[in-house]
Amino acid sequence: MNYFLTEEQEMIKNLARKITDEKVIPIRQELDEKEEFPWEVLKVLSQSDLMGLFIPPEYGGFGFGCFEMCLVIEELSRGCGGVAVTFAANALGAYPIFLFGNEEQKKKYLPDVARGKKICAFGLTEAEAGSDAAAIRTSAIKQGNEYILNGTKQWITNGGEADIYTVIALTDKSKGIRGASAFILEKGMDGFSFGKKEKKMGIRCSATRELVFEDCRVPQENLIGREGMGFLIAMKTLDMTRPGIGAQSVGIAQGAFEEALKYSRERKQFGQSISSFQAIQHMLADMATQIEAARALVYAVARFIDSGAKEFSRESAMAKLFASDIAMNVTTNAVQIMGGYGYMRDYPVEKMMRDAKITQIYEGTNQIQRNIIALSLIKEASSWR
Amino acid sequence: MEIIVCIKQVPESTEVKINPQTKTLVRESVKGIINPFDMYAIEEALRLKEKLGGKVTALSMGPPQAEESLREAISLGVDEAILLSDKSFAGADTLATAYTLAQAIKRISQFDLIICGKQTMDGDTAQVGPSLAEKLGIPHVAYVRKINEVKTDSIILEQMVEEGYRRIKMSLPGLITVVKEINEPRLPSLRGKMRAKSVEILIWGVNDFNIEKEKVGLEGSPTQVIKIFAPQRRKKGEILQGDIDSQVEQLVNKLKESRVI
Ligand SMILES: Cc1cc2nc3c(=O)[nH]c(=O)nc-3n(C[C@H](O)[C@H](O)[C@H](O)COP(=O)(O)OP(=O)(O)OC[C@H]3O[C@@H](n4cnc5c(N)ncnc54)[C@H](O)[C@@H]3O)c2cc1C
């Protein structure tokens, strides 16, 4: 469908597509099997300027918005969900600096991110704090001009590979979530190390790792915003990036759909191609319709955000929720259409199905998205008389 | 370092049409791409520029639509592009092409190195690079697979030969043609693509540089193509059945029948 992209958006999309076709698809299976971090692809993305897409021109980027990010994430995901999340989590780690950082912090960190010289990550989740992010325990105690961090973050995308980490820690345990603060950490700081690297079901080329802080001294200049703003910064950042997970979902679904459609025309059973069976046709029709609906929602939300909207938690959650459920459904049906071949690693759809599952879990599970949407609805209704 | 890369737009599809009168390719109707070997030439030029500074100019002779290929070169990072386009340039063979390019390069005048792809996908002659060097009176090395070192007045490189390679020192200014082993071409950048959209591509016709009209185009081309044809497909082979012994026997019989043995 025609989404009336501007010439620049068309350019960005085509560039991301070319990179996906030429540099991602040929290696995705190997990356998946070896659980190898996609440095080669990141190099291409940097050289093509896409790492700096969302960073303002004054810091060496392009100043594009959520929508253009979605276009790139969608295209990359069509090829490989793992590569796409590596790209997306870089933005997730950089957004807090870009959205809430002061001028010095932006000047210090963003130009290297824009050029792809440094990669970012975002650390909120802990062993005891998943959906209940307010239950984090990592502490940041002020001592002179420094904060001393102690604790362990878990399942941090780009962990170990990234250079810059936005980490949420408690500066005041007595205040609960109002006592959380956001910090910029750099790889190589004393007392900052990496723990276990996870073995995952899908998105296996992406790195998911523990961040360990043992009396890690962080200069006070690295506090983002003010003390106590950490939770707000995390939530606003996630509002901004969730449409990206929606775009990842659309891309994964699109990739699987294309494989299934192509296969259905080639595979013959009972003397005819399986695409001549109405059962298969209806599945294909439903899949295509669902993908288009998800894409339309993701694009609409991203454009709404870029229009300068102030409050968009609900819409952002809707985009992520709807698209990720669709991705799971579509990839499962793609495997179904391809039968036993779809289940085999020789074909890409089993990987797409494994990759799709994570979109329902990270950046807040879909149950949590429904909570966010419902809360926002009820709050709105309470203002009715 | 001032580098000139010579690139050609070639038809993407394999189903090319040939003008029955001139026996040359009809280029207007098919989608054009940069000749794949020229992509390595562009990449090598960009790498040299990134290392040593300077400027990369892309030069192409072709119909007006070849401008697209020059814009693509710009999107990859080439600084300037010049298209030699004129009705009278059409139908040029390798001699006329080399002459036209040489005259244009004389007008550019400033250069340290010219890089060409080893050959084009449509013509396949591999002649234009070397004859261009001859016309300019500069040294050349064809089939370069690696540049080892660049000094102000010379360059050390490796030339592919049948079994192995030759290390050669060539004085500058000079010309090289490159093979695909030399590098891996990059993809365009967003900045490059944005620049490519708006940048002016210089277009030079017969009157824009010093040309003797009888030396360009079809008129300046002594090569006459008599006929272009796809070679006849050979007859299908025959697969012998049965166990090894009986296959051997059948084979020997067949060879005898056809008087091979
Ligand atoms: C591959 C991967 C990468 C990740 N990357 C990052 C990262 O870069 N940075 C980061 O900070 N985190 C990251 N995470 C963490 C991710 O955001 C969390 O896994 C997610 O928020 C869910 O938390 P949990 O896994 O602890 O599940 P839990 O919170 O334990 O949830 C378990 C189940 O209970 C449900 N549930 C929980 N609470 C409620 C409720 N109130 N109402 C209804 N249902 C509920 C959930 O929906 C889920 O079904 C990553 C996780 C994975 C798996």
Image: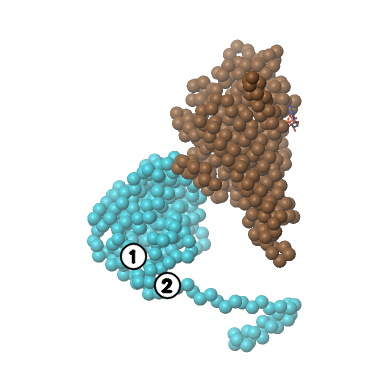
**Mark closest to the chain's N terminus, 2 or 1:** 1
Helix, strand or loop at label 1? It is: loop
Residue type at numbered disc 2: Ile
Say few, some or many: other residues with alpha carbon within 10 Å of mark 2 (under 14 / 14 to 19 / 20 or more). few
x%, y% of residue B25?
A: 40, 65
Residue A223 relative to residue A339: left or right: left
- Structural crowding at the residue carrying mark 1, measured as other residues with C-alpha within 10 Å and reported as few (<14), some (14–19) or many (≥20): many
| Secondary element at tag 2 | loop
Q: What is the chain letter for disc 2?
A: B
Q: Which residue is mark 2?
A: B228
Q: Is residue A316 visible?
A: yes
Q: Nearer the viewer, residue A5 or A138?
A: A5
* The chain in brown: A
Q: CA distance from mark 2 to mark 1?
A: 15 Å
| Residue ID at (75%, 77%) | B243
Question: Which residue in the structure is indicated by mark 1?
Answer: B91
Q: Chain of mark 1?
A: B
Residue A248 visible = no
Of the 4 image quadrants, the one containing the C terminus of chain A is top right
| A218 lies above or below A346 | above
